[in-house]
Image: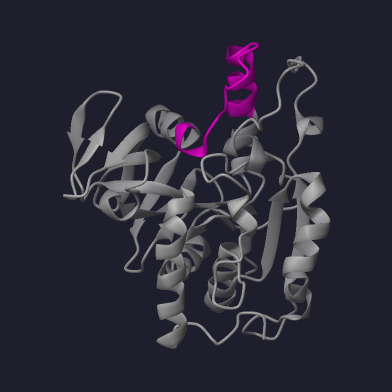
Amino acid sequence: MKLSLVIMAAGLGSRYGGSKQVDGIGPHGEILMEYSIHDALRAGFGKVVFIIKPEMREMMEARCGYLRRRTTPDGSPVEVEYVFQDFSSIPAFYPIPAERTRPFGTVHALLCAEGTVREPCCVINADDFYGFDAYRQMAQALRRLPEEGRAAMVGYLLKNTASLHGTVTRGLCAGREGILESVRETRNIQLYPDGSLRDLGTGRDLDPDAVVSMNFWGFMPSIFSVLRRDFEDFLRAAGDDLRAERLLPEMVDEQLRQGALEVSLLSSAGQWFGMTYREDREAVAQALLRLHESGEYPRSLRD
């Protein structure tokens, strides 16, 4: 069974102060998504789909063109596809405000890949490091999922995903016996030097060991009809709000509340890290260097 890795790479990275998706942070200039691709191929994925802005195509080919020479563990060539997240795919009934420049969120991003992804897929952020164990677990889960009404998610502990350098947005999860019950998108989460965490929007303290979504989803191809209905409903409610966006955790939570989707909640033994703020960069670079030195990764991911 072919499995696709779908990488959402069209985000603006505004809080980071630049395009963190293409910041060469590895010891030989590797960008974070190269680690995701390396780990996914090791876990048995055979297709990589990049969701990008049109103007990113040439740069992405220069960065990741070597993938076309790679093979999967069974010897098959790695399939590489590019799809664009732009306003051309917005339904005709919705008048896009003239002042709108920002994308419409991760639901729209994944929906842009509808014509390209015809197999079970793992959907990730381009600027997060998830660790090999997450891809191993997801590959196993995707091979077991039925076509309709089921999905999977790898969760991480909140305390390991926040930044001392500013607030973050995380999907706080509730689950029971390996099944996700809800995911609540929570903005303005602040980590403090003593390890405590607070939701600045409500002023309440948060459990450091709470499970959160980091946009590591496993879907079957049937999810695209769900995404389309959800996104169209969102656009009808959004009106001319220039900042409105629809996020995957919000869509999943809505489907959970309707009883239309069951999501297996997987817990990775690996390490997550990412770069929300530029000040996070040095710690991530040092963590990657240690992983190379320990033998977890080869000298260069491109060799």
Residue closer to the observer: 107 or 301 = 301
Residue 303: in sight, yes or no? yes
Q: Quadrant of the N terminus?
A: bottom right
Q: Is residue 252 above or below residue 72?
A: above
- x and y percentages locating residue 263 in the rendered image: 41, 47
Q: Position of residue 145 (x, y in %)?
A: 49, 57
User: Image check: 158 left or right of 117?
Assistant: left
Q: Quadrant of the C terminus?
A: bottom right
Q: Is residue 39 left or right of residue 253?
A: right
Image coordinates for residue 185, horizontal then vertical, percent? 39, 33
Picture quadrant where residue 58 is located: bottom right
Residue 133, compared with residue 12, is above or below; it is below
**Residue 79 picture quarter:** bottom right
Q: Residue at x 26, y 51 (%)?
A: 159
Q: Is residue 245 magenta?
A: yes
Task: Locate residue 292, reporting x and y percent.
Answer: 47, 82
Q: Residue at 49% across / 51% down in the picture? A: 278
Residue under the point 50% across and 33% down = 251
Tell me where the magenta segment starts and ends, as one range. Answer: 229-250
